[in-house]
Image (cartoon, helix red, strand yellow):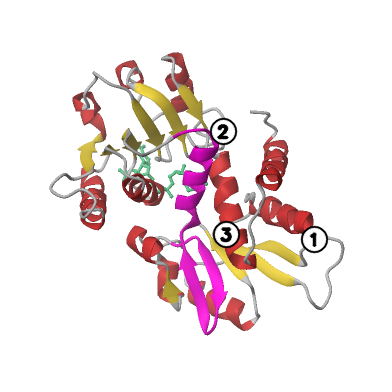
Amino acid sequence: MERIDGHTRLCGLIGNPVEHTMSPVIHNTLAEKEGRNMVYVPFHVEQGQLASAVEGAYALNVLGLNVTVPYKGEVIGCLKETDAMAGQIGAVNTLVRTKGGYKGYNTDMMGLYRAMCAEGISLEGEEIIILGAGGAARAAAFLCASKKAAKVYLLNRTSGKAEQIAEEVNRAAGKAYPGKPCVCPMRMDEHGKIPSDRKYLAIQATSVGLYPNVEDAVLTDSDFYRKIHTGFDLIYRPSQTRFMAMVREQGGRAFHGLKMLLYQGVTAYELWNDTKIEEKDALAVYGKMKEEMGIDE
Ligand code: NDP
């Protein structure tokens, strides 16, 4: 931005840690492109300080906040209101200033959807495998159901977590799938039971393979990868994960999670500023993010 003055609006990120975040690149570039007098900075919030951080931000007239690990669930208790879908997912990553307090949204889910649309990946009528049952997998499962996927196999190491998400998503989506639950929970090591007479979109939503453990993948059995036509890894560091490499080895297309990160940011920015970002500007920001990561793909 050109200068900070008496009208500059402040947005930021709260989490712990926040030091390696890419979000300032997203928001400050968008503000610059739009000629908007706004700056975005990370705030490292210590455990036990979340409620005072949110209250203090509101008192300081902070326009909006992103929320990252480990506060996406806990922050719900600090809000005036929570968007219905974010409430169902049980995780909020964006706080939007409203009269009397912040309203919470989950733009991770929208970010994933917009990233998939940008890559020409559709969910409607698709058979989908989700690996993982943490916060990101939960958002992915709600997204798949809300976009009318035909079937979702939700695989996790801890099967109880997959069962819980499946139950919640099937209950929420019940009207759209009368008598036919959309999400089928499984243990990770039961992947062989997934029918092999067709191919699937696989969403990798575990933290296995995340930098610095770049040689790891949650599944390493090539039989599994033969069933995949498209693999979407939510991890973006590294930009080529072992999961992606194994999908490609078996002839599938594979994507990393940097575009999801881009679009969750774009969606948050649009909510804070009541604006719509043009695709060319979003892609220009993406170019900067790739530069920052030192990648061209
Ligand atoms: P959580 O900590 O909530 O969930 C972690 C998941 O990984 C759980 O399903 C966990 O299984 C599984 N897992 C962890 N270690 C192992 C292991 N050794 N073997 C098998 N499974 C394992 O994390 P999030 O859901 O928040 O994030 C998941 C990934 O998504 C992260 O890599 C994160 O970086 C990425 N992400 C990317 C975003 C983007 O914008 N691109 C946005 C949000 C997340 P279990 O339940 O058994 O412990």
Residue type for callout 1: Gly
Residue 44 appears anywhere in the view: no
Mark 1 neighbour density, 10 Å: few (under 14) some (14–19) many (20 or more): few
Give whichever of discs 2 and 1 has the lower sequence position: 1
Q: Which mark is residue 238?
A: 2
Disc 3 from disc 2: Cα separation: 24 Å
- Camera-side mark, 3 or 2: 3
Ligand 1 near label 2 (Cβ, under 8 Å)? no
Residue 46, placed above or below residue 172: below
Q: Which residue is mark 3?
A: 268
Q: Which residue is mark 1?
A: 35
Question: Which quadrant of the figure contains the N terminus?
Answer: bottom right
The question of residue 34 being in magenta is answered with no
Residue 202 on image: x %, y %: 37, 31
Question: Which quadrant of the figure contains the C terminus?
Answer: top right
The question of residue 116 being in magenta is answered with yes
